Image (cartoon, rainbow, N blue to C red):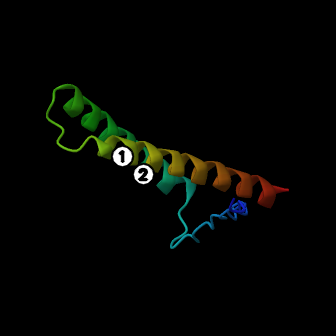
Amino acid sequence: MADKTTKAPAAKSVKKTKEASEVKTIEQLNNDLVALVAENLESRRSHQMGELVNPHVLTVQRKNIARVHTAIAAAHKEAVKEDK
């Protein structure tokens, strides 16, 4: 009988966040958010009508909207810290 070797658990990978390449104001982020939401709505309409060639675009757009929401929340948090 051969000895069974146990595998060590794989090391967990730690995701590193990217540094912002440019700092945007809350107003700029809100403008970006409005544009992204409008683009997402148009893509969803196209998908429902069967015109959207690559539906993966919807996933990418939702994630980009979430990233902007996160950036806005972080900017608000920083603004509150600076006021104190």
The one nearer the camera, 24 or 11, is 11
Single out the residue that lies furthest toward the top: 48
Residue ID at (55%, 68%): 23
Q: Mark 2 points at which residue?
A: 32
Q: What residue type is labelled 1?
A: Ala
The one nearer the camera, 31 or 36, is 36
| Residue 10 versus residue 63 in the image, above or below | below
Secondary element at tag 2: helix
- Provide residue 10's location: percent of width, then percent of height: 67, 62
| Residue 70 versus residue 49 in the image, above or below | below
Dot 1 crowding, Cα within 10 Å, few <14, some 14–19, many 20+: few
Q: Is residue 84 left or right of residue 72?
A: right
Q: In this view, does 12 lie to the left or right of 66?
A: right
Asked whether the beta carbons under mark 2 and mark 1 sit within 8 Å of each other, the answer is yes
- Provide residue 14's location: percent of width, then percent of height: 67, 64
Residue ID at (22%, 44%): 54
Q: What residue type is labelled 2?
A: Asp
Q: In which quarter of the image is the C terminus?
A: bottom right
Residue ID at (68%, 51%): 76
Q: Quadrant of the N terminus?
A: bottom right
Residue ID at (17%, 42%): 53
Single out the residue that lies furthest toward the front: 1
- Provide residue 38's location: percent of width, then percent of height: 33, 39
Single out the residue that lies furthest toward the right: 84
The one nearer the camera, 79 or 36, is 36
Q: Mark 1 points at which residue?
A: 35
Q: In which quarter of the image is residue 55?
A: top left
